[in-house]
């Protein structure tokens, strides 16, 4: 007999319980082989059986050793509820069941003496999302007809780059009444309004990253959709840097500067300019906190790409400068502008915050026109790894903050001059077109999305505590791991296909939203197209309240 | 729905012609109002082409407020004309007590002022008048500009014509360009300021259509220029964009089309002037016009033009004879006033065209 002490970890302390039916199990071993968390193990149980032989009851007892599958009782190797065992079981003999009485948040801290870390998104679900309280309610009828989503043409593009106020455009009419210009203006790229958000090689498996890059190339070259992806902070394979596909990539630099040595070295060999540079100051999922790549995921190729040893890789919470953070960021802007000879727009990404409007005002009022985009990331954004307390308890929702920034621009007559890009839980319900469209009507030029891209690839994590183990390097779907055996579960071609198909579907849905409001180009700031039955939401966002 | 029309002639024409043009299209509008702007004036205003004329509808108190204010600024009246009204019972008109058309000399201090300074003074004075009269709804100032006057009223166009005796042609009240529209703007409140044509510093615009980017236009325009106010109608946005592009930015007229209905990106990329077109699309994105529309515009130099939305959802036709050119929402209006013209040379502009008519009635069709 095992002796159980009162404080031992047992299955009912853990967030998921394995329900196992020995009578259906064929002992094939698939579940154990597939569980990347080692949360289930084969064991032998001693079973007592009472039986009777002959014509009259004559109970006898027999003990036998029976092979079974049992749950690991450990705060390291515990079940994350990913459901891979259920997926592979041929006989429906096993599945994880959520344990509402879990004590994990307490016992992990008590036993580990360290903060809890995980991946995924905020796991505190309080109320209905704001975006789901908003509808597109201004429908064109009669004299102002709806368009035909199938027949009409639509211009679904958004700017990435600094846009001059009209009176600063260096255009003068010549004798033939044509405007001529000889001056250089800040570079602006018109791209699809949904950017694939910044997820690094390192956070993602190389096969996942390859799948995303393939999807982007296919969307551009075969579907005519200028979709861009952001590299994330972690470098880019040299082969991609030197290829023509670089033009579809936004290179990111964050406070760790990981991978930039390799990027700088590749510059003389680049045959195309990158689509843009994104300086990451903060991230919505863990505002005020830097990136975190745990040593378990720093495989050999990650060490090579980032130029680091196998160790926990922490990006500092802010960019380190000699005199001030502002100075170091400004220097970065200037050096990137200069490095690419003012041909590549440089934008900034910050976490949504109570102070976002002040930050935005500072940027939009700068007279040098250096900031080519304001990427604002809200609390519902995803991450590969963060402290759970940051994930669940810090941050600012994106919807009202994006609206505040847009209205701040309106007040100054500067709307559109620094394109606003929003993220943070958009597409959380699986319906990104609707979320993006509403954000655009509230003033965003476009949106960016990361977590949803993983879900397209097969990520099983959700916002109710399922999986969320991206930080462990043991991703059961092969998406956020560097373990060769796990990454092989992921078929990059299938990933690419899913992303491409999702984008095609989303494009159709955008048109289905544009057509009824009678617009053929994106309705940036057309808040008159939105309504809400929630008075508080309507008042806060300055849209029409309806009932 | 609005119906719009414009007549430009080598000779002075009477507003009865504009009424006729609009009357035959009455099934297309809702008979809720009549508004017109006359430019290049004849008759009693012909000797005063260089001096500003005030067009206003107001109460007796309003007349006093306006005259005091103008006197204070230093304007001196040189002539005035009040239409003889025919106040017979049963007319569908919501009339104001006074309709004032007065021409003024500039203040002495402006004796040596240049044109631009005078134009700014006229705008500032009109805005002051509007504010002063707005307090107790004592009146409405439609325009204060040389060689131009505006008449607007709520009611049935036929009865408005009868009330002002406009059906009977005479030589006293004429112009070489008349733009007219027959509907009070009922998308929003019925207010006199909401009826187009609208006028600002020599620019006039009227439209048949909807501007679904009204909010975007409005939010952007209200910070661009002190004269961009009111926004009682989405058509005002079209006027302000015209004023901004042509006067403030100093760009040739055809760039107005690039601002309100920009080419699709795919087409811009094929063009030699893509840098300019992209620059316009980027920096003036909030002045884009989306929705069905036909616009008629008039410039300070009497140039008349028309253009449509990018999907050609609203009609417009241009007909002409040797002395007169007419732009109209419906061809029946032109048939009414130019019955003997050669209708085979009528122009039905397409969605990428701007048709411009200069003072010699020369027609230019410019493709975007």
Image (cartoon, rainbow, N blue to C red):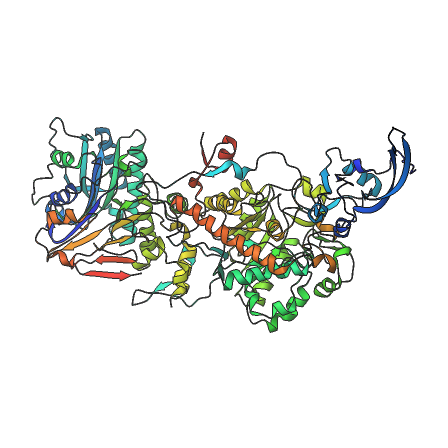
Q: Residue at x 48, y 56 (%)?
A: A159
Quarter of image, res A429: top right
In this rendering, is residue A54 above or below A516? above
In this rendering, is residue A97 above or below B257? above
Q: Residue B335, image x and y in percent?
A: 12, 49
User: Which quadrant does the N terminus of chain B fall into?
Assistant: top left
Can residue B39 be seen in the rendering of this structure?
no
Q: Residue at x 59, y 46 (%)?
A: A424
Q: Residue at x 44, y 31 (%)?
A: A546
Question: In the visual, does B365 lie left or right of B85?
Answer: right
In this view of the protein, which residue sits in the foreground, B293 or A469?
A469
Q: Residue A241, image x and y in percent?
A: 61, 68
Q: Residue A225, image x and y in percent?
A: 49, 59
Residue farthest toward the top in the current orientation of the protein: B89
In this view of the protein, which residue sits in the foreground, B131 or B67?
B131
User: Which quadrant does the C terminus of chain B fall into?
Assistant: bottom left
Q: Residue at x 77, y 52 (%)?
A: A33
Q: Residue A42, image x and y in percent?
A: 82, 47
């Amino acid at each position: 007999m095992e002796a159980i002490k009162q404080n031992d970890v047992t299955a009912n302390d853990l967030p998921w319980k394995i329900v196992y039916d020995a009578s259906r199990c064929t002992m094939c071993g698939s579940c154990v082989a597939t569980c990347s968390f080692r949360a289930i193990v084969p064991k032998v149980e001693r079973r007592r059986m009472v039986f009777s032989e002959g014509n009259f009851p004559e109970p006898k007892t027999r003990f036998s050793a029976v092979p079974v599958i049992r749950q690991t009782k450990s705060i390291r190797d515990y079940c994350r509820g990913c459901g891979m065992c259920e997926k592979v079981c041929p006989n429906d003999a096993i599945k994880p069941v959520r344990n509402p009485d879990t004590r994990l948040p307490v016992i992990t801290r008590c036993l580990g003496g360290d903060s809890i870390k995980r991946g995924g998104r905020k796991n505190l679900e309080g109320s209905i999302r704001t975006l789901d309280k908003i509808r597109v309610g201004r429908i064109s009828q009669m004299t102002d007809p709806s368009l035909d989503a199938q027949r009409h043409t639509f211009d679904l593009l958004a700017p990435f780059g600094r846009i001059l106020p009209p009176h600063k455009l260096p255009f003068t009419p010549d004798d033939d009444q044509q405007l001529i210009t000889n001056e250089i203006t800040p570079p602006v790229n018109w791209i699809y309004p949904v950017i694939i958000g910044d997820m690094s090689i390192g956070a993602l498996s190389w096969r996942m990253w390859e799948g995303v890059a393939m999807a982007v190339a296919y969307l551009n070259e075969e579907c005519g959709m200028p979709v861009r992806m952001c590299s994330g902070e972690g470098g880019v394979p040299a082969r991609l840097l030197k290829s023509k596909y670089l033009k579809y990539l936004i290179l990111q630099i964050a406070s760790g500067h990981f991978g930039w040595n390799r990027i700088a070295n590749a510059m003389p060999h680049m045959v195309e300019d990158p689509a843009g540079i994104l300086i990451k100051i903060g991230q919505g999922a863990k505002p005020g906190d830097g990136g975190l790549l745990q040593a378990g995921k720093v495989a050999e190729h990650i060490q090579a790409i980032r130029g680091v040893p196998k160790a926990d890789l922490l990006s500092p919470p802010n960019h380190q400068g000699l005199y001030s953070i502002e100075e170091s960021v400004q220097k970065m802007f200037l050096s990137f502008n200069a490095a690419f000879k003012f041909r590549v727009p440089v934008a900034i990404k910050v976490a949504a915050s109570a102070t976002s409007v002040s930050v935005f005002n500072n940027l939009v009022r700068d007279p040098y026109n250096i900031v080519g985009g304001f990427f604002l990331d809200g609390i519902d954004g995803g991450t590969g790894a963060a402290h759970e307390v940051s994930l669940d308890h810090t941050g600012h929702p994106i919807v009202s903050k994006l609206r505040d920034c847009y209205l701040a621009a309106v007040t100054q007559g500067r709307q559109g001059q620094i394109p606003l890009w929003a993220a943070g839980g958009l597409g959380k319900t699986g319906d990104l077109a609707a979320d993006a469209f509403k954000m655009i009507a509230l003033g965003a030029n476009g949106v960016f999305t990361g977590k949803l891209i993983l879900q397209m690839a097969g990520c099983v994590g959700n916002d109710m505590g399922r999986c969320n183990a991206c930080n462990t390097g043991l991703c059961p779907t092969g998406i956020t791991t560097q373990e060769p055996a796990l990454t092989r579960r992921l078929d990059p071609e299938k990933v690419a296909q899913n992303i491409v198909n999702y984008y095609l579907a989303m494009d159709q849905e955008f048109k289905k939203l544009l057509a009824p409001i009678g617009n053929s180009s994106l309705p940036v700031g057309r808040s008159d197209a939105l309504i809400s039955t929630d008075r508080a939401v309507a008042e806060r966002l300055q849209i029409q309240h309806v009932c | 729905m609005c119906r719009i029309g414009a007549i430009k002639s080598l000779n002075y024409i009477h507003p009865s012609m504009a009424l006729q043009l609009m009357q035959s299209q009455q099934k297309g509008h809702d008979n809720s109002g009549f508004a017109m702007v006359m430019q290049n004036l004849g008759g009693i205003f012909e000797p005063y082409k260089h001096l500003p004329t005030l067009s206003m509808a107001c109460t007796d108190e309003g007349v006093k407020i306006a005259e005091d204010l103008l006197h204070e600024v230093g304007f001196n009246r040189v002539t005035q004309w009040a239409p003889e009204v025919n106040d017979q019972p049963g007319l569908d008109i919501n009339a104001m007590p006074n309709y004032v058309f007065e021409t003024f000399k500039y203040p002495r201090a402006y004796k040596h002022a240049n044109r631009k300074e005078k134009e700014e003074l006229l705008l500032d004075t009109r805005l002051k008048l509007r504010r002063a009269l707005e307090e107790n709804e004592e009146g409405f100032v439609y325009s204060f500009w040389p060689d131009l006057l505006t008449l607007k009223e709520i009611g049935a166009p036929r009865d408005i014509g009868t009330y002002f005796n406009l059906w009977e042609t005479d030589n006293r009240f004429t112009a070489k360009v008349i733009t007219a529209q027959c509907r009070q703007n009922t998308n929003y409140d019925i207010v006199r300021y909401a009826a187009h044509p609208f006028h600002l510093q020599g620019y006039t615009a009227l439209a048949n259509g909807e501007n679904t980017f009204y909010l975007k236009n409005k939010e952007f325009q209200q910070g661009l220029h002190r004269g961009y106010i009111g926004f009682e109608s989405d058509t005002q946005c079209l006027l302000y964009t015209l004023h901004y592009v042509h006067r403030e930015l100093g760009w040739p007229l055809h760039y107005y089309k690039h601002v309100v209905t920009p080419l699709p990106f795919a087409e811009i990329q094929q063009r030699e002037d893509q840098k300019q077109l992209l620059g316009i699309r980027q920096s003036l994105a909030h002045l884009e016009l989306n929705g069905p529309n036909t616009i008629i515009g008039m410039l300070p130099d009497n140039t008349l033009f028309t253009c449509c939305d990018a999907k050609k959802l609203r009609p417009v036709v241009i007909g002409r004879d040797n002395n007169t050119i007419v732009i109209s929402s419906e061809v029946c209006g032109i048939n009414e006033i130019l019955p003997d013209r050669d209708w085979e040379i009528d122009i039905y502009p397409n969605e990428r065209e701007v048709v411009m008519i200069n003072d010699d009635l020369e027609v230019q069709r410019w493709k975007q």
